[in-house]
Amino acid sequence: MKLSIAVAALFAASGAEAFAPSSRHVVSTSIDKATKGGVLVRRRGPMYMSTTEAPATANGESVTTNGASSASEGSDGNNNPYLQRRPRPEYIPGRIPDSNYVRIFDTTLRDGEQSPGATLTSSEKLEIARNLAKLGVDVIEAGFPIASPDDFNAVKQIADTVGNEVYDDGYVPVICGLSRANEKDITVAWDAIKNAVRPRIHTFIATSKIHMDNKLKKTPDEVVDIAVNAVRFAKSLGCDDIEFSPEDAGRSDPDFLYRVLGAAIEAGATTLNIPDTTGWNMPWEFGDVIKKLRDNVPGAENVIFSTHCHNDLGLATANSLAGALNGARQLECTINGIGERAGNASLEEIVMSLALKGREKFDNNALYTGINPVHITSTSKMVAEYTGMKCQPHKAIVGANAFQHESGIHQDGMIKNKSTYEIMTPESIGLMRGESQSGAGIVLGKHSGRNAVSTRLRELGYDLDADKLNAVFARFKEVAEKKKGGLEDEDLEALVLDQAGNINDLWDVTGLQVATGMSGIPTATVTMMGPDGVQRYVASTGTGPVDAVYKAIDQIMGVSVELEDYSMQSVNEGIEALATTRVVIIPKVGGPNDSQSTHAQSGITNDRKFTGLGSDTDIVVASARAYVSALNKLLTFTLRRKQQQTEEGEDGGDDGEDLEPQLVGRTPVGVCDGEIC
């Protein structure tokens, strides 16, 4: 017993060992023995081992420590070494008690959402934020509150909920709001985040010559004054956690950076974020920038230096790690590396690099994070589904091929010893291979039950709540009735993707029939159930069956949009393969659902884009489901905006104009090509 307890303590002290395949069998066996009496604490989501291991007594009963009740053997996660989250130092703005600890700042919900076509709804942002908290990120940049009322409300909702959900180990994420360096932006940002346990204002202004001359039209002296005033104003509001970023620092004059950053520190900044905004720097260049700033900025010892690296040359992760090597102790990143242009540094790449190499390859520093990587896979898939931005198959850590082996030589090596070709286990990032990948998996067909489907989904990295599981299972039954030979893993994932945005649908397609051919006019009859519970049907013609279906849907739902992008792909091979359709729509300017958003940095107002996904063995049905999914997102956004306008009108003494959004369609119960049937 003493030996197994000692091994457990060693595992807790060196979290990186859990990720190495060479440690797989030894560590898991020892931990299984040592943690039968381990203290387990209930948090949001799965059950985790606490950071304090309790030894088992002679009769096998566990000992309770720190007032936490213990769990009996067999509880969820009780014997799973991958659910261990190592402790983190106390959170103090501007200082980290352990100089080896690296804070992870996630900006998926802000910079990531600035990716073209990656618009997220408020509910989707909240779900992603909750998963980021499960991961254990230190800071969640929830958005750019001034951009729109919807963005403000999304940030506020995250601050009020996720920002107040304190885990049993004392962890609660910092909730950060971005603002330009002016009082209006900063005030709105503070109003959105101030109810969080740990709120942070992140303000920025460009400091490179090309930005100051061409974009800002400001002199260096004016830029310094603006930066100082912004930080001082944020502090005057009561915010004691202020991050300042000199935009395009990677191309800025070093002496000017020393000056503006020193002034920001004196004004009250606690974190200095150094962005390589255009991805211009090489790793050795960017590392040198961080080193020189720490050596030359007055007051540098009183703040945390941070990195924010873009991937224009494919070096965002490398530059971030070079920053850590030279003293940066906060790394900004996004799930799947999404973001402006070529994206940002990838959270999963940074976290796993530090987990595997942080103890040995960063000079004399044993760098580590507080991330619980077992939630990487589920978070990655959630972000990909909600944004509509799929990962490339060979994407490091989370790509579909990251743990796949096709070469015969590689397969032979994997059979003999998995560490021959894998430097980490898929289980360490929450990807359970399951027996199917070794040729002995369950065939999911029309006779499969809910438990079989749920188990396979968990093995694939999807931890769905009851409502989502019910929706996926219902669709599974529909498809399994049509598809011979059972559903493959890809089919099941497509159904999850299909249902990701459909839990709170306003409209649903309940019937669809098309007639098309070389000699006739394509015609579609569509039946839909609206939010008022009334079924409506319309017959319409078009240039093809999908066009006819879309025109019928437009008439029923009373929308006016432009289809910007339409794509379809087969999930797998064969005549009965499932088809997945992705559409991107833009509301027509001046139409009933006109929607606009403001870019976080440029201030340019653009039309919002909404993405929809649909899957079915029938390509026309898949197309209809994708289109309705996108329209439901648009109408949900419109509903929130109209409600906000109504509330603002009531506060300002509005004359009572009806601002109720059109959600129940503008057509009669039956319409055929615009005429009442």
Image (cartoon, helix red, strand yellow):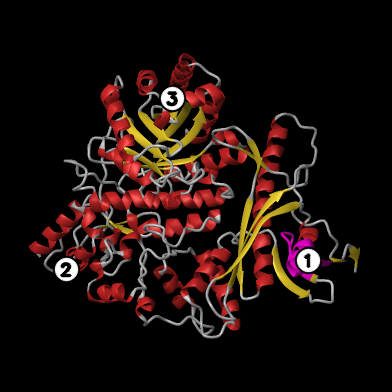
Q: Is residue 669 left or right of residue 299?
A: right
Q: Is residue 514 left or right of residue 171?
A: right
Name which residue lies at 18% across and 41% down.
Answer: 363
Crowd band around label 1 with a 10 angstrom C-alpha radius: few (<14), some (14–19), many (20+): many
The secondary element bearing badge 2 is classed as loop
Name which residue lies at 55% across and 24% down.
Answer: 214
**Residue 345, how many percent across, how many down?**
40, 45
- State the separation of the CA atoms marked 3 and 1: 57 Å
Name which residue lies at 60% across and 77% down.
Answer: 478
The secondary element bearing badge 3 is classed as loop
Q: Quadrant of residue 262?
A: top left
**Residue 542, how many percent across, how many down?**
81, 65
Q: Is residue 465 left or right of residue 92?
A: right
Of the 4 image quadrants, the one containing the C terminus is bottom right
The secondary element bearing badge 1 is classed as helix
Q: Nearer the viewer, residue 202 or 322?
A: 322
Give the answer, above or below, for where 407 lies relative to 163.
below
Quickly name the residue at label 2: 60
The magenta-colored residue range is 525-553
Label 3 vs label 2, nearer the camera: 3
**Residue 387, how many percent across, how many down?**
54, 53
**Residue 579, how many percent across, how many down?**
60, 71
Q: Quadrant of residue 416?
A: bottom left
Look at label 2 and name its amino acid.
Gly
Total numbered circles: 3
- Is residue 542 a member of the stretch shown in magenta? yes
Quickly name the residue at label 1: 548
